[in-house]
Amino acid sequence: MSKDIMGLDDLASNPTPRVPVCLCLDTSGSMMGSPINELNEGIKLFYDAIKDDEVALYSADIAIVTFGNGGVQIVRDFTGLSIDDSLPNLSANGGTPMGEAVNLALEILEKRKSEYRSKGVDYYQPWLILMTDGMPDSMAALETPVAKTYELINNKKLTIFPIGIGESADMNVLARFSPKRPPLRLQGLKFKEFFAWLSQSVSRTSQSTPGESVKLDVDGIKGWGEL
């Protein structure tokens, strides 16, 4: 059965309101070694934490888009971990087509929202996590996704967390995606701490009412991020 069919079957059989979370992750050559290893470990921790929370397990709808090794790829299309908990094994190589990746992430988020509506499934404001350790290959390719992101955020239709990895991450580029909140730089390689915070945030959101404003754990951010 294809992942698309699995995701739609999940919507038909499980009417729980969804928290769509798209991880848009840099897998370019500069992520080789410890960074990509820690990123893989962080995703595993994220999965495990969601699976340990019964409400979040049936609410969290997770997709992963990578940019770098293999170009821009949908490594995981939107599916709940109760349906598919297979872990990606990300490897690093190639350039940094960031703009194209964010564009694809926004496209699959819009497609997923349409699927929710067609199946009568309620959903929370989508989350987009953008993590990169460098500069995009093309500044021109940023124009469309930056404009789309800006519009969605200002219309309260998207929550974005742009996160820089290491000293070479271009925080000015990341700031363009986030008109309401400054981007954050990961402290060292604290991917596990970040994904623990993200799983707790998804859990807290899944226990609220769709449309309700959920307060972010700002203190928790201090455990992994810095301005």
Image (cartoon, rainbow, N blue to C red):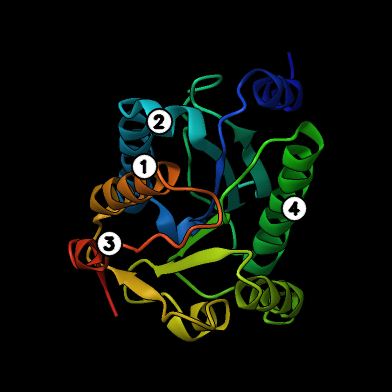
Dividing the picture into quadrants, the one containing residue 47 is top left
Disc number for residue 217: 3
- The one nearer the camera, 172 or 220, is 220
Residue at left offset 60%, top offset 48%: 65
Q: Secondary structure at mark 2?
A: helix
- Counting residues from the N terminus, which is met first, the one under dot 2 or under dot 1? 2
Q: Which residue is tagged 1? A: 203
Percent across and percent down for residue 46 are: 35, 39
- Counting residues from the N terminus, which is met first, the one under dot 3 or under dot 1? 1
Query: What's the residue type where badge 2 is placed?
Result: Val
Q: Is residue 9 above or below residue 16?
A: above
Lateral position of residue 97 relative to residue 16, left or right: right
Percent across and percent down for residue 162 are: 46, 69
Q: Which residue is tagged 2? A: 55
Q: Is residue 30 above or below residue 151?
A: above
Tag nearer the camera, 1 or 4: 1
Lateral position of residue 169 relative to residue 141, left or right: left
Spatial distance from mark 4 to mark 3, Cα to Cα?
Answer: 26 Å
Residue at left offset 32%, top offset 76%: 167
- The one nearer the camera, 2 or 167, is 2
Could you tell me if the residues under marks 2 and 1 are in contact, i.e. CB atoms within 8 Å? yes
Disc number for residue 110: 4
Name the outermost residue toward the bottom: 172
Q: Secondary structure at mark 3?
A: loop
Query: What's the residue type where badge 4 is placed?
Result: Glu
